[in-house]
Image (cartoon, rainbow, N blue to C red):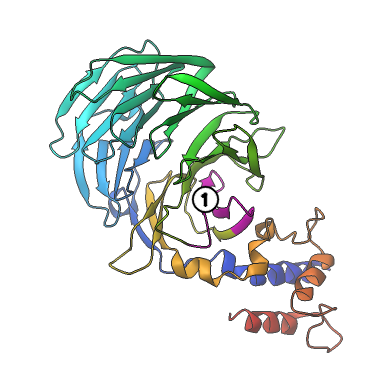
Amino acid sequence: MKYYRIFIFLFVYALFLPVSFAQDVTQWHVFKDNKAPPGPTLTNAIVFSPDGTQLAIADVNGITVYDTYTGESLALLPSLIGHVTALAFSPDNRIVASAHEDSTIHLWNAHTTNNITDLTSHTDPVVALAFSPDGNILASGSFKEIHLWDLTLGQISRVTVLRGHRDMVTTLAFSPDSKTLASASFYGTILLWDVETSQRRHSLSAHIDSIQALAFSPDSQTLASGGYWNSDAESTIRVWHIHTGQLMTTFENHTAPVFALAFAPDVYGVNGITLASAGWDNIIRMWDPHTEQLQAIFEDNTAPVLALAFLPDVHGSDGKALASVSLDGTIQLRPLTASLARIPNHQRNARVAFRGDVNNDGIVNILDLTFIVSRFGQNSPDLNGDGVVNVLDLVLVAQHIGQ
């Protein structure tokens, strides 16, 4: 019975290999020779530039700006890891904003490493930062407050304060058209703000715990939010219509905190609109929010994934790539065009395929095996008809999927 269960597991695993493969992954590490310094926290804050080509990481060395493609260090901004609570790039990658425990925000020239100015209107620690895509506003979030810093005159001359949250503002995101600001709080509330009028449009209260990730679709019509896991519910990703505030879709496959969300830019054109999600379970998932289909799973990450970014071509190829950063300082770049094209249509709907419970009855058993072979047009898991379910049947499945 023991070996029969092992066979069932291998059989299920083999079928879904195309969904969780690692092909042509480019990888580099923040720490020299892949040796991380001692201590429980290796990175304190991580953020990609808006175009994904650069990456800022606050670690034991300060704030380092890297080339995402090569891992080359482009700039080192002087700061202590214990003080940095949030980072953000300006749209042109020229400025890096860093927030600190003492409630101060520093603006740095990413090319010269010079400190441009310090912003000091907050009275509580700042834990969230975001530049508007048009470069006119820097938003900063702290306890119950969001400050909007006006950057249009070349220097900070006006600050607008938004109040509406009842606890710490943990995450901020601007829509690509810079007209809407989404803010999320520690206890799961999302507020949508009209940037021009500073008025609140909608309050979204579907999450029951802290929200660590927000992302807008390229057309500025849709917002995705990633929830934190607690003992009473799975982590969820919710997709909202920003003009009506209505919940459109919920993904419940994550069983650990969701830390990163990213929509693919319009130029990708891969299988419709694509949303990537990742978090504490070390797994990256890619979804179609409109059809609720799972498009791909990448399970080869070395640690919890804290940030994601879609990139232009890798190594001069015509394909596109997804970049990820893990807690241990590992950066991976995955080509996407071939990956998504390889996934059979019937596997795109397998929302719990990575668990092995393919028929979604709560357990992994012979019924899952029967369900799998039915997708090959068979009524029995004894695919070769020899009267025994064994490794020879597994070979037939492997041949069918090209393994």
Residue 13 seen in render:
no
Percent across and percent down for residue 81 are: 32, 30
Residue 282 vs 389, above or below: the answer is above
Q: Nearer the viewer, residue 133 or 115?
A: 133
- The three-letter code of the residue at mark 1 reads Leu
Residue 365 vs 234, above or below: the answer is below
Relative placement, left or right, of 58 versus 392 is left
Residue at the location (71% across, 72% down)?
11
Q: Nearer the viewer, residue 253 or 237?
A: 237
The residue positioned farthest toward the top in the image shown: 123
Q: Which residues are magenta?
A: 270-294
Residue 228 vs 100, above or below: the answer is below
In the image, residue 293 lies in the stretch drawn in magenta: yes
- The quadrant holding residue 344 is bottom right
Residue at the location (82% across, 71% down)?
370
Q: Nearer the viewer, residue 107 or 275?
A: 275
Percent across and percent down for residue 63 are: 27, 35
The residue that disc 1 covers is: 275
Percent across and percent down for residue 276 are: 51, 51
Residue at the location (29% across, 50% down)?
53
In the image, residue 364 lies in the stretch drawn in magenta: no
Q: Nearer the viewer, residue 199 or 367?
A: 199
Relative placement, left or right, of 208 versus 21 is right
Percent across and percent down for residue 399 are: 63, 84
